[in-house]
Amino acid sequence: MKKRLPDILCKITGAILHPLLMPTYGILLFCAVLGQAMPLPTAYWLIAVLGTFTLTAVIPMSLIIIRLFAGTISDIEIRNASERTPIYIYSIVCYIFWGYFLLKILHAPIVLFLIATGATMSLIGVTAINRRWKISAHLTGIGGLIGGICAYCLNQYLALPLGLIAVLLSLALILMYSRIYMKAHTPHQVVAGLLWGLTMTSLPTLIYNLI
């Protein structure tokens, strides 16, 4: 039976806006901004992007593929909430190494480490919540990206880039519809995911600025 066009578009949306890709999108945005403000070699920013992509996307996705072939998860999207916990825990470890990579190896600005810490806290929360309620990891991811931008602007005393945030919120709405249409989540689960990611990712920077 041929898949309908809406199903295909929803799957493409979920793949492009996959939560494992959000840190890479975020670091690309920050490199575009910081690359103009900080006169560092292009190789530095390339390492930042490749390191982030490897630690937060490639390595966690490798476990998903391994478990899929081993038959310990039912599908690549891991629709069964109970199957997500080992993947989340593995991803948390990868995110911790990502924070270490940014702080100790790249010596990146402290705000990037704070955002990475917030993203890790967000993922820890999702792991705990997932044991009782299937909060949307996709919306947590894009919420975290928005929260990271807000955190950076707060730390640097910059005006919020309203155009960029409007685009990201529009993508979040499309993603919400996609996840609900595919029956992956309920409306409450996608809204909760967006708010959780936005709040937790920006929280460490907010606390840091208040101290």
Image (cartoon, rainbow, N blue to C red):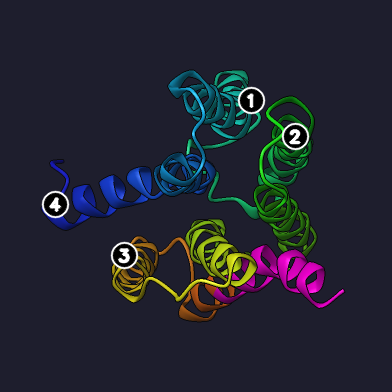
Task: Name above or below for residue 84 compared with residue 155.
Answer: above
Residue at left 66%, top 29%? 72
Q: Gap between marks 1 and 3, in whole Å?
A: 27 Å
The amino acid type, in three-letter code, at marker 3 is: Leu
Which mark lies nearer to you, 1 or 3?
3
Residue that extends furthest to the bottom in the rendered view of this protein: 188
Q: Mark 1 points at which residue?
A: 63
Front-lying residue, 28 or 106:
106
Q: Earlier in the sequence, mark 3 or mark 2?
A: 2
* Residue 197 part of the magenta segment: yes
Identified by mark 1, the residue type is Leu
Stretch of the chain drawn in magenta: 195-211
Instruction: Calculate the distance from the C-alpha at mark 4 to the C-alpha at mark 2.
Output: 34 Å
Q: How crowded is mark 3: few (under 14 residues within 10 Å), some or many (20 or more)?
A: some
Tell me which corner region of the image, top left, top right, bottom left or bottom right, holds residue 198.
bottom right
Disc 2 crowd rating (10 Å Cα; few below 14, some 14-19, many 20+) is some
State the mark number for residue 90.
2
Q: Can residue 179 be seen in this view?
A: yes
Position of 94 with respect to 17 (left or right) is right
In this view, the mark in front (4 or 1): 1
Q: Name the residue under label 4.
A: 4
Q: Residue furthest front?
A: 39
Is disc 3 placed on a helix, strand or loop? helix
**Secondary element at tag 2:** helix
Where residue 49 appears, as percent x and y from the top left, is 50, 30
Distance CA(mark 3)–CA(mark 4): 21 Å
Q: x, y (%) of residue 12?
A: 27, 45
Query: What is the C-alpha distance between the residues marked 1 and 2?
Result: 8 Å
The answer to which image quadrant residue 183 occupies is bottom left
Instruction: Give the label, 3 or 4, closer to the camera.
Output: 3
Residue at left offset 51%, top offset 24%: 50
Q: Name the residue under label 3.
A: 171
